[in-house]
Amino acid sequence: MKSKILLIGIDGLNLDTGLENAPTLVALKEKGFFTPITIEPPTWSGPSWSTILTGAKHSQHGVFDNSFTGHKLLHHPDLLSRAYYQDQSTTTFAAAGWPPLVDPIGHGPIIHERREQAKALRHRVLVRDGETYGYTHVDAEIAAAAQYAISHHGPDVSFVYFCGVDEAGHAFGSIGDEYRGAIARIDAYLDNLLQAVQARASQEEPWLIVVTTDHGHIDEGGHGGDSAKERASFVVAHGVGRKNPLWPQSFEPHQLVDLLLAERA
Ligand SMILES: [Zn+2]
């Protein structure tokens, strides 16, 4: 049976620091599938999310920094578009506070609604601007909207994105109380989303909850380089109303999209 897929992106999460402050993520990791993955440098959000969400490598999608200059994203449809093309009854939902991920005005976006999806009214998107208004506020709105969407619409494939952890890493470094506090805050949102899924998932409506990040941080805060800490990422995948996925114990970031689409076959 086809699973509904909820992919949750937590920007700039060092798992080393994160697990102490993230009981929900720890529980998902222990009950679910887990593998570390290694991000291709440069470890910026633009290239990394482009790779994770489209399945194309940096050299293919042409995103090498956060300017998106010269990108080829139009030729590399994202997970949500590909799920729709795979089955045109598929409903999709995206919510993010970093505009290049979802905002049709401006750079990208990486998750780019195709005309067919728009015409079929199969796609919902929530765009916020955390760069301008701050992610503490914006992540809370994203979490509330995503919880509502899961509970009331049960979209077939979703991407929900939080950036407060990355913001705290840049401002205060990635080993202090502020970074840990941001992780605890996002983990509570993760718990809300998990509960919304658990309330409706069943054998007739199986769900797969997947959590990943686009890069880590150096201790002082910051990323973009090729150190192990900056390149460290992971994939957690937990089935609700179904078994965990039987994925290879190690894979590369660009391979995640195909693994997810296979769960929709
Ligand atoms: Zn960052």
Image: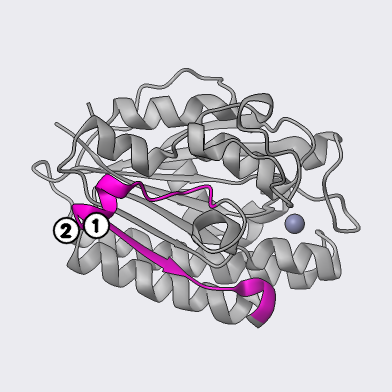
Mark 1 in CB contact with mark 2 (< 8 angstroms): yes
Describe the element under mark 1 as helix, strand or loop.
helix
- In the rendered image, residue 131 lying in the magenta stretch gets the answer yes
Q: State the residue at coordinates (40%, 39%).
A: 79
Q: State the residue at coordinates (22%, 50%).
A: 91
Describe the element under mark 2 as helix, strand or loop.
helix
How far apart are labels 1 and 2 at the CA level? 5 Å
User: Image height check: is 136 above or below 14?
Assistant: below
User: Image height check: is 223 above or below 136?
Assistant: above
Rendering coords of residue 200 (x, y %)? 16, 58
- In the rendered image, residue 41 lying in the magenta stretch gets the answer no
User: Disc 1 residue type?
Assistant: Gln
Boundaries of the magenta span: 109-132
User: Image height check: is 98 above or below 241?
Assistant: below
Q: State the residue at coordinates (77%, 71%).
A: 177
Rendering coords of residue 139 (x, y %)? 54, 72
| Quadrant showing the N terminus | top left
Quarter assignment of residue 124: bottom left
User: Image height check: is 107 above or below 114?
Assistant: below
92 to the left or right of 90 = right
Rendering coords of residue 217 (x, y %)? 80, 50
Rendering coords of residue 17 (x, y %)? 72, 53
16 to the left or right of 235 = right
Which of the pair 224/122 is nearer the observer? Answer: 122
Q: State the residue at coordinates (57%, 51%).
A: 108
Q: Name the residue under label 1.
A: 198
Numbered-mark total? 2
Q: Name the residue under label 2.
A: 200
Marking on residue 215:
none
Q: In which quarter of the image is ligand 1?
A: bottom right
